[in-house]
Image (tube, grey):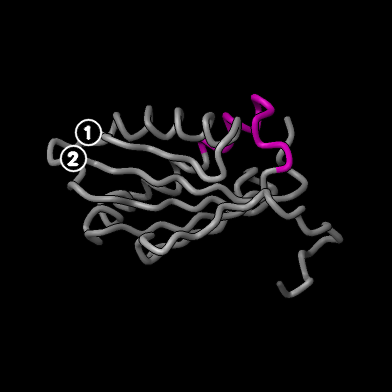
């Protein structure tokens, strides 16, 4: 940790962050959003095979989805004290979500996972695979 969080914001407390796992795919796509436009600071996405992350990034889908789900969960009061959250999703050959897990588990993960599942259902023909979406939230914007 660099100790610099900008704008006098205090660093988030320990335990509020997603924890990497040995079997996580490499993160290959990233985006940033300013605090003036979103509760979401940014996101990172990766998958195995990489074609799944590429499909999720097509036409700006993943950044748009992540902004919408973060906004909805923040407005519901579900992101209080959440610094980062990871969503791990598995897609089958038919493009259906077969597993979706939020890390760390709890209310924020449930809110974001439910909203993410609904957004994925709107997308056409995703390739099979496993993806990791890591969301980072602006510290001063996590409340309604």
- How far across and down, in percent of the image, does residue 61 sit? 36, 45
Residue 59 magenta-highlighted:
no
Q: Where 96 falls versus 63 (above or below)? A: above
Residue 74 magenta-highlighted:
yes
Which quadrant does the C terminus fall into?
top right
Residue segment shown in magenta: 68-81
- How far across and down, in percent of the image, does residue 110 sit? 52, 30
Q: What is the C-alpha distance between the residues marked 2 and 1?
A: 5 Å
Mark 2 crowdedness (10 Å alpha carbons): few <14, some 14-19, many ≥20: some
Q: Nearer the viewer, residue 102 or 41?
A: 102
Extreme residue toward the right, this view: 8
Extreme residue toward the front, this view: 22
Q: Where 1 falls versus 93 (above or below)? A: below
Q: Where 72 falls versus 31 (above or below)? A: above
Q: Is residue 16 left or right of residue 127?
A: right
Q: Nearer the viewer, residue 68 or 103?
A: 103
- Residue at mark 2: 92
x 29%, y 30%: residue? 122
- Residue at mark 1: 96
x 74%, y 34%: residue? 143
Q: Secondary structure at mark 1?
A: loop
Q: Where 71 falls versus 31 (above or below)? A: above
Q: Is residue 34 left or right of residue 105?
A: right
Extreme residue toward the top, this view: 76
Mark 1 crowdedness (10 Å alpha carbons): few <14, some 14-19, many ≥20: some
- How far across and down, in percent of the image, does residue 11 sit? 78, 59
x 37%, y 37%: residue? 100
x 46%, y 29%: residue? 115
Do callouts 2 and 1 mark residues in contact (Cβ within 8 Å)?
yes
Q: Is residue 67 left or right of residue 9?
A: left
Which quadrant does the N terminus fall into?
bottom right
């Amino acid at each position: 940790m660099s100790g610099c969080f900008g704008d006098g914001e205090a660093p988030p407390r320990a335990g509020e962050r997603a924890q990497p796992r040995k079997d996580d795919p490499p993160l290959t796509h990233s985006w940033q959003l300013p605090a003036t436009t979103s509760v979401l600071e940014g996101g990172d996405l990766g998958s195995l095979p990489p074609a799944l992350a590429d499909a999720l990034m097509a036409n700006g889908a993943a950044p748009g989805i992540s902004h919408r789900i973060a906004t909805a969960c923040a407005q519901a009061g579900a992101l209080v004290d959440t610094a980062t959250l990871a969503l791990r999703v598995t897609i089958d050959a038919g493009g259906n979500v077969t597993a979706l897990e939020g890390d760390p588990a709890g209310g924020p993960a449930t809110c974001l996972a439910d909203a993410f599942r609904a957004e994925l259902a709107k997308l056409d023909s995703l390739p099979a695979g496993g993806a990791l979406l890591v969301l980072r939230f602006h510290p001063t914007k996590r409340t309604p």
